[in-house]
Each structure stands twice: as C-alpha cells, then as structure tokens.
Amino acid sequence: MKDFIRDIPKAELHVHIEGTLEPELMFSIARRNDISLPFDSVEAAREAYQFQDLQSFLNIYYAGANVLQTERDFYELTRAYLEKAVRQNVRYTEIFFDPQTHTDRGISFETVFKGIDRALSEAKTDLNISSRLILCFLRHLSEEAAMETLERAIPYRDRIVAVGLDSSELGHPPEKFKTVFDRARRHGFLTVAHAGEEGPPEYIKQALDILKVSRIDHGVRCLEDEKLVDRLRIEQIPLTVCPLSNVKLRVFDRIEHHNLKKLLDRGLCVTVNSDDPAYFGGYVVENFEAIQMGLNLSRNEIVRLAKNSFVASFLSNDVKQKYLEELDDLTRDDL
Ligand code: ADE
Ligand code: ZN
C-alpha cells in the first residue's frame, strides 16, 4: 500500500508555502540574513512543534516565517517544496501564500511573489510539476488590510488563480471579508476559504453564500449540520482535508478518530493534503499513509481520494480528464 500511495499521480490543493519551511532551511536562511530564532537548534525547533490548537501553531509559524526576507529566500523555500512534491508523484499543486505575513514586516509584495513564482515557472520545465498560486488574506487582520493586499495582487492576476482566507478562524467569520472577495471575483479571481476547521458549520455556509467559494479548506465540522452535508454532496463542493494537521492542532484527538471516512461515505468530494508539512510531520504521501492506516481505507478509497484531488482542482477539464484516465489505466487491474 505504501508504494501504491507514493506511485499514483496526485494533486495537492491545500499547502501553505510558509508551512513548508523545514527547520534546516529556516536555520540556514536565518544565518544568511543574520536573524535570531526562538530555537537553539533544528532539533529544539522540532521539539517545540507541539500545539494545543490553531492559534498556538500560528504563533510559531509566523515566528518561523520571519526569516524570509529576500526573493532568493522565497525562491529556495518554494523550490524545496516542489522537489519534495515531485518525489511523492504530486503532478500538480495549488499553493497558498500569505503576503501580509511579509508585507507587515516591510518585505515588498513583489519580493515575495517573484521568488515564489520563479521557482514555480522553473519547476514546470525542469521538474515536470505544474502549479497555481492562491493568495490568502489573514483573517485576524482587517478587511481594509486585505483590500490593500488585493490591490498589490491585481497586476499579477494571470499568475494567481484564486484568493483564500486563512489564519485564526474563531471570531473571524467569512462575512467579515464580503467586500474584498466581491472585488476579487470582479477581477477574475476564483475564491476558496478555510472554514469549519475550528469554526462552526455556519462559517462554511457563509463561505459558500457570501464569499462564493469553489472549495472549502478543511470543512471537517460540516458533519455537525445534516442539511449542510446534503448541500455539499449535491453541489459536490470539494473539501481539502488535512489529516495530520487536524491531529496536530487537536481538531481530532487521534488519527483513528478522524471523520474523513464518514465524509467519503456521505458522498462528499474529499481530498487529502498536507497544510503545513514542515510543522505537522509529513507531506501529502505521509498524510495518505496515516489516514489509510488510521481508518483502514481500501485501495478503492485511496484511488477515489487521488481522483478527487484532480476533480477538485482548478485545472481545465481536458487536463483533469487526462489525469483521471491515467489513474483508471494504472488501477484497472486492481479494482
Ligand atoms: N495558516 C497556515 N495553516 C493554517 C491552518 N491550518 N488554518 C488556518 N490558517 C493557517
Ligand atoms: Zn491551511
């Protein structure tokens, strides 16, 4: 099963580029930029990655992101993620970035964007992995701040497929960002939002009705609302679920108690993703392995999850079809 999971083609739709910053790279960039870190060593950093909830993680995640200063830093960060993704047979990835985490420290939007974008363009040719970018607004900040960030992004609209919403969920409902999402859609951006990770099902409904999202990031709390589950199934709204993240941030106390199989059994379009792999103990393959073992998922269910990753993506229908056929060909003898 391990080889099978690694070898099938996959798309990743929920990964924060800042969350791929491994401690080794964090220390090397910190040295280069003469920045001090709140950890004494790589090992101490890994040991500090014990979280009580989303906020306790975000505090450490934002501290780590402080080392990123130059276009080269953002390039190296992105390149390292793409090299790992390719080794796991991720063919296509939609990557979140959080410009406000950097612009609030005086790093320009252009520095962040250009470093990431250069790595993505290069990897399309030399690593054979394609990707798109999703700009996330930090929901603990104001809508005005999100609007300023959107203005910075508009010139790069052809390189940024969608806008999203991340950071501290509780107390920051999707409706807070109605105006900026309306404006983003008018400029041709698709929309997604983190909702129902720690927040209630009501936030998922707001993301759908007010922000008009194409997908829900996480969404695992939808099961608390039967009518919402029916709607997600009928409309086939994808959920980008992140199993190891949910355990690390204590949304579920252990992987065996994760509700991913229930979501699948209810007919929802569920995908498996890594969220912040450097902090949560694994990339997309490790997430597939953990949830497969934890919930005893069958090969059929693994194939379904891999297919969903392409179905739920922002790829064109032609390209989606090509990947779905490849998965059918690869697995025909198994099924
Ligand atoms: N930013 C990075 N990871 C996140 C998560 N899991 N939820 C909300 N914001 C995030
Ligand atoms: Zn996330």
Image (cartoon, rainbow, N blue to C red):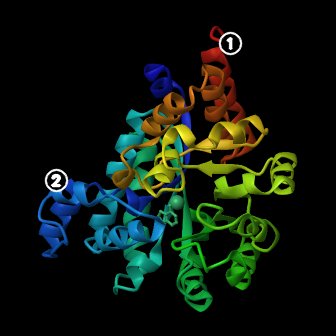
Q: Residue at x 46, y 58 (%)?
A: 249
Q: Nearer the viewer, mark 1 or mark 2?
A: 2
Q: Is residue 151 above or below residue 216?
A: below
Quarter-of-image position of residue 156? bottom right
| 189 or 249, nearer to the observer | 249
| 296 or 211, nearer to the observer | 296
Check residue 335 in the rendering and tell me which mark sits there, or answer none. 1
Q: Is residue 36 above or below residue 127?
A: below
Q: Residues within 10 Å of mark 2 (few under 14, many from 20)?
A: few
| 62 or 163, nearer to the observer | 62
Quarter-of-image position of residue 222? bottom right
| Residue 193 in the image, given as x and y percentages of width and height | 65, 65
Q: Tell me the residue that label 2 is attached to.
A: 43
Secondary structure found at label 2 = helix
Amino acid type shown at disc 2: Glu
| Residue 36 in the image, given as x and y percentages of width and height | 15, 75
Between the C-alphas of marks 1 and 2, the distance is 43 Å
| Residue 246 in the image, given as x and y percentages of width and height | 51, 52
Quarter-of-image position of residue 172? bottom right
Check residue 179 in the rendering and tell me which mark sits there, or answer none. none
Assign the C terminus to one quadrant of the image. Answer: top right
Instruction: Return the residue found at the far bottom.
Output: 144
Q: Residue at x 28, y 54 (%)?
A: 22
**Residue 128, can we see it?**
no
Q: Residues within 10 Å of mark 1 (few under 14, many from 20)?
A: few
| Residue 164 in the image, given as x and y percentages of width and height | 61, 68
| 9 or 188, nearer to the observer | 9
Q: Is residue 100 above or below residue 123?
A: below
Looking at the image, is mark 1 or mark 2 earlier in the sequence? Answer: 2
Q: In screen coordinates, is 65 left or right of 173?
A: left
